Image: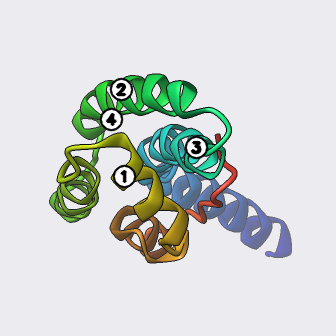
Amino acid sequence: MSRRLATVAVLLGGLLTACAGANPAQHFCDDYGAAVGKLYTAAGDYAAAPAEFTTVARSTLDELTRVRAGAPNEELRRAFDSAYFAMTVFSEDEGLADFLVRTDFAQDDVVKACAEHGVQLKPDAG
């Protein structure tokens, strides 16, 4: 009897693991964190290297277009759209860098949405 229960428990555990699968938000959140982490780091160095910030900002905004396509659900896409809009309203790189330096990374809409999906992002992810 106990051998049967052990077998059933092992089979049930394997079935639950297979059904649960990997966190579908993980890849999207990791990609977003890596891209935006680089941008936050470059923003912190803006005064010393404004040209470097410009290069990083352009490549990051291009990369984020690809990242959005990987959002596994509408909630993460909406969070992305909100965060992306906040990064694109600045006509000058200096304004974007200043905004990022003054912004609390934890308040980024995607960072909060990823946390709700069990993925913790850090500002130094890039």
Q: CA distance from mark 1 to mark 2?
A: 12 Å
Residue tagged by mark 2? 58
Q: Quadrant location of residue 98?
A: bottom left
Mark 3 and mark 4 residues within 8 Å of each other at the beta carbon:
no
Left or right side of 71 for 115: right
At 28% from the left edge and 45% from the top edge, which residue is drawn?
71
Q: Secondary structure at mark 2?
A: helix
Q: CA distance from mark 4 to mark 1?
A: 16 Å
Q: Between residues 108 and 14, which one lies in front from this camera angle? A: 108
Q: Residue at x 72, y 59 (%)?
A: 10
Give the residue at mark 1: 96
Looking at the image, which is closer to me, 15 or 7? 15
Closer to the eye: label 3 or 4? 3
Disc nearest the viewer among 2 and 3: 3
Q: Position of residue 104 (x, y in %)?
A: 52, 75
* Residue where numbered disc 3 is placed: 46
Question: Which badge, 3 or 4, comes first in the chain's sequence?
Answer: 3
**Tag 1: residue type?**
Leu
Q: Secondary structure at mark 1?
A: helix
Please report the residue visible at 44 percent of the width from the left and 68 percent of the height from the top: 117
Which mark is nearer the camera, 2 or 4?
A: 2
Tell which circle, 4 or 1, labels the residue nearer the N-terminal end: 4
Q: Amino acid at mark 4?
A: Leu
Distance, label 2 to label 4, CA atoms, is 10 Å
